Image (spheres, coloured by chain):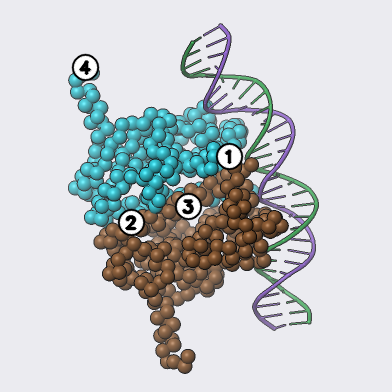
Chain colours: A cyan, B brown, C purple, D green
Amino acid sequence: MPDSLTGRRRSVLHETRCQTCSLSSLCLPLALEVQDMDQFDAIIRRRAPLKKGETLFRQDSPFTSVYAVRSGSLKQVTTEGSGDDQLTNFYLPSELVGLDGIDEEQYPGTVVALETTTVCEIPFDRLDQLSESLPELRGQLYRSMSKELRDDRRMMRLLSRKTADQRLASFFTSLSDRFRRRGYSPYSFRLSMSRADIGNYLGLAVETVSRILGRFQSQGLVEVSGREVHILDLESLIQVAEEEGAK
Amino acid sequence: MPDSLTGRRRSVLHETRCQTCSLSSLCLPLALEVQDMDQFDAIIRRRAPLKKGETLFRQDSPFTSVYAVRSGSLKQVTTEGSGDDQLTNFYLPSELVGLDGIDEEQYPGTVVALETTTVCEIPFDRLDQLSESLPELRGQLYRSMSKELRDDRRMMRLLSRKTADQRLASFFTSLSDRFRRRGYSPYSFRLSMSRADIGNYLGLAVETVSRILGRFQSQGLVEVSGREVHILDLESLIQVAEEEGAK
DNA sequence: TGGTCGGCATGATCATGATCAAGGAGGAGG
DNA sequence: CCTCCTCCTTGATCATGATCATGCCGACCA
């Protein structure tokens, strides 16, 4: 493309509008009419893509915006005391990052890209203002937060009652489901996170993650090669995830 | 009080207004001006007190309202599959119950009073409407949800990285702190929940809770007699709660 | 081509907390 | 007063998953 506009074209790419975004049916403006979407669109700041390992924001930095993931994925890590990190969330396209920073006006964790990732920055004060005149937007914002609360409760349940096998099985079925909702194959996907990340998130040692993955594989539930995952028997996997009282 | 108004007086008691409520500095209308508080006050429905063990709402029933705790305490229990309950939260005065039901329009758990408890019912559609014209109210609602998200993350960390000792210590220091903020003694209080509830919440067996309480007692950290708790050495308790990487 | 380093797998041992079992304390109701 | 509960405590054993240790593989680079 020997085109003097190449540069500009790329920037136009970043500035794709909500109206043309394939995620709009999952994202915040989900319930908006076309003309309202314009208003919403106007407050959004596109960001240059983050490369793998780059930071979206750091723990304790001042809260200014929430971010909608457009492509790629991120993890949120909270450090407390010295050295002891806790990975509290993975974020996939259409999900909203940073909502837990509103309260204390600083972000409670560092958010890092797991692969090349693009996000839409939504300044929170503008969003709040706009939510005054757009009840649908406001409702969607409440729903997003509520959903996150609900997901957190599920996670607590996983951490406090499930065995290592159940945790891994839940992790895969949940990922599978999230991919399906986004129009990707629920059976074949690539993990953007390391085994260590998975272990940290699920409250398991890396070795345990590795071992159980091996076992799942030998049981014909999944086929795993590095970060490439094929789910062979989703039904059984779901069953493992829900097994009665860890027994 | 041989007074024909006694009955009415009691009902007036339930209908105490936000303006005179000692919790208003912690509760939703926290940031409202007097005249705005009137509007808020108008949408609230006072409820007859719940007795110990009575249910505020049941899991999967349709979401209509959030509730502010006025006095007493409650627990939220989520049942999944058969028989396997998870206690996901305890609620104290000024806290908001039911926010995790917005998303799917039904409550994700059953909420039960742990003792005689009064709540203010806030119909959510009215609250949402009102939040349109009262930015402060809207902000406070966002903050409440955000805070709950943040607390959930803390809980996940507790469940996935902390030892049983650390969990119990965290539980007590957190309770202590919550009581202090509400103007009660941070050193002496009565647990409204059973050991089983505590264990369920913290992901521990009842026996473990009991044993560790005994140990804390013999170490001079607390004095426990039934549900009566005296914290003797809050400093050390905090230290136990935060010990480096479970080591 | 050898060297190093990060990510992953696998084996051996160990520790924490669950589970099983029994018994005590306190309250409610006959 | 006794009895039946529920809630709590304490002891003994066991199992799950952490930890420690080792080695492999592929990437990146001198």
Pinpoint residue B221: horizontal percent, then vertical percent.
65, 57
Residue bearing the label numbered 3: B151
Residue A21: x percent and y percent? 28, 38
Residue B103, located in which quarter of the rendered image? bottom left
Mark 1: secondary structure: loop
Question: Looking at the rendering, in which quadrant would you find the C terminus of chain B?
Answer: top right
The quarter of the picture where residue B206 lies is bottom right
Q: Which residue is mark 2?
A: B139
Label 3 near label 1: C-beta < 8 Å?
no
Query: Callout 2: helix, strand or loop?
Result: helix
Label 1 – label 3 distance at C-alpha: 21 Å
- What is the chain letter for disc 3? B
Q: Are marks 4 and 3 on the same chain?
A: no
What is the count of numbered marks? 4
In the rendered structure, the residue with mark 2 lies on which chain? B
Question: Mark 1 sits on what residue?
Answer: A204
Q: Nearer the viewer, mark 4 or mark 3?
A: 3
Residue closest to the eye, D11 or C19? D11
* Residue name at image x 19 percent, y 23 percent: A5
* Disc nearest the viewer among 1 and 2: 2
Which residue: 48% across, 29% down?
A: A228
Mark 3 lies on a secondary structure that is helix
Contact flag, marks 1 and 2 (Cβ < 8 Å): no
The disc at residue A222 is none
Tell me how far mark 2 sits from mark 3, CA to CA. 18 Å
Cα–Cα span, label 4 and label 1: 51 Å
Res. A2 mark: 4
Badge 2 and badge 4 in a common chain = no
Amino acid on which the number 1 mark rests in the picture: Leu
Relative to B190, does residue A223 appear above or below in the rendering? Answer: above
Q: Can marks 2 and 3 be said to lie on one chain?
A: yes
